[in-house]
Amino acid sequence: MDIKSIGIVGAGQMGNGIAHVSALAGYDVTLTDVNADALKAATDVISKNMDRQVSREKISQQDRDDAMGRIKTTLTLTDLGPSDLIIEAATEREDIKHAIFAELLPSLKPETILTSNTSSISITRLASRTDRPERFMGFHFMNPVPIMQLVELIRGIATNEDTYKACRAVVDKLDKTSATAEDFPAFIVNRILMPMINEAVYTLYEGVGTVTSIDTSMKLGANHPMGPLELADFIGLDTCLAIMNVLHDGLADTKYRPCPLLTKYVEAGWLGRKTQRGFYDYRGDAPVPTR
Ligand code: NAD
């Protein structure tokens, strides 16, 4: 199937990045969210990020204008009906994702491919509640989407080969690299990354190190470009907790127990950069550790 148009559900940090790279690659994009402010913020972020690419001579002004012209936003989910490919990138909650697919399905063409950018939820289970499990896949971008090269493609039990090939062709056209993962909790990247972040939070919780000493240790001692707590703030602490819960529930192993301190930050609404506070406070000129 030749994919020309992409419908994106959720205009948060992932949805706006997916819209950005898809429009630049020549796809017609329709972006939706339940929150009008999120849609407005997404267009502003995309426009600002493309301007930066123009100033760095990565793209031309004409590329930028054409790409911005290919992005439509809407508060009505069913406006995504005519799209050839749907990428769902709403909040990491299974009930929200099921409800989105249930509302969207009646307006879709029979051949439309449905995908989810979920970090951890079972693709097979999401697919089983739709009318097209064979045309359903995990399409997992990394954050920030315009910069990170990898897309994990996750096959559910029922995903057919044509769907996989069509999605792989989209990844190629986005000029990114795909890695194929089987559908087990958190797939590959987060199966390895999240327990490390959770362990960093335990290291903080048990007083082994401060926020600064933990991040400095992993940057300078393990050569990671970002410390694990800085990275957790960047990803979103609610997303990190949701992924740990999926690993804990799905693999039934206590080694995946979310750290109580991570839960506490989420309960406080300190979700990281997106709420200005997490393991660091971002409200001033430079981030300040909150512990
Ligand atoms: P986010 O909180 O920044 O954005 C989520 C958006 O979804 C919000 O704007 C919210 O208003 C919207 N939304 C909620 N319910 C909706 C509905 N019913 N219909 C339409 N929009 C709805 O979250 P995010 O970080 O962009 O994550 C989105 C998805 O991408 C999640 O599944 C997450 O696991 C996955 N993901 C996140 C990262 C990351 O680093 N943050 C990386 C890869 C994948």
Image: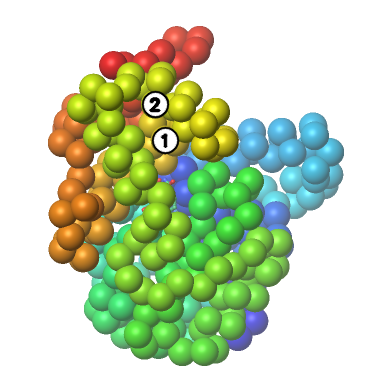
Pick the front one: 284 or 150? 150
Q: Which of marks 2 and 1 is nearer the N terminus?
A: 2
Residue 156 occupies quadrant:
bottom left
Residue 182 visible somewhere in the drawing: yes
Quadrant holding the C terminus: top left
Quadrant holding the N terminus: bottom right
Residue 3 % position (x, y): 61, 76
Pick the front one: 204 or 142? 204
Q: Which amino acid does label 2 sit on?
A: Ile
What is the tally of numbered marks visible in this picture? 2
Q: Using residue 241 as the reference point, say whether residue 284 is left or right of it.
A: right
How was this image coloured? rainbow
Question: Circle 2: is it few (<14), some (14-19), or many (20+) Cα within 10 Å?
Answer: many
* Residue appearing at x 63%, y 46% in the figure: 147
Question: Circle 1: is it few (<14), some (14-19), or many (20+) Cα within 10 Å?
Answer: many
Mark number, residue 228: 1
Residue 97 % position (x, y): 29, 62
The residue singled out by tag 2 in the image is 214
- The answer to whether residue 281 is above or below residue 48 is above
- The answer to whether residue 164 is above or below residue 275 is below
SS type, badge 2: helix
Residue 109 % position (x, y): 46, 82
Pick the front one: 234 or 249? 249
Q: Using residue 27 as the reference point, say whether residue 34 is left or right of it.
A: left
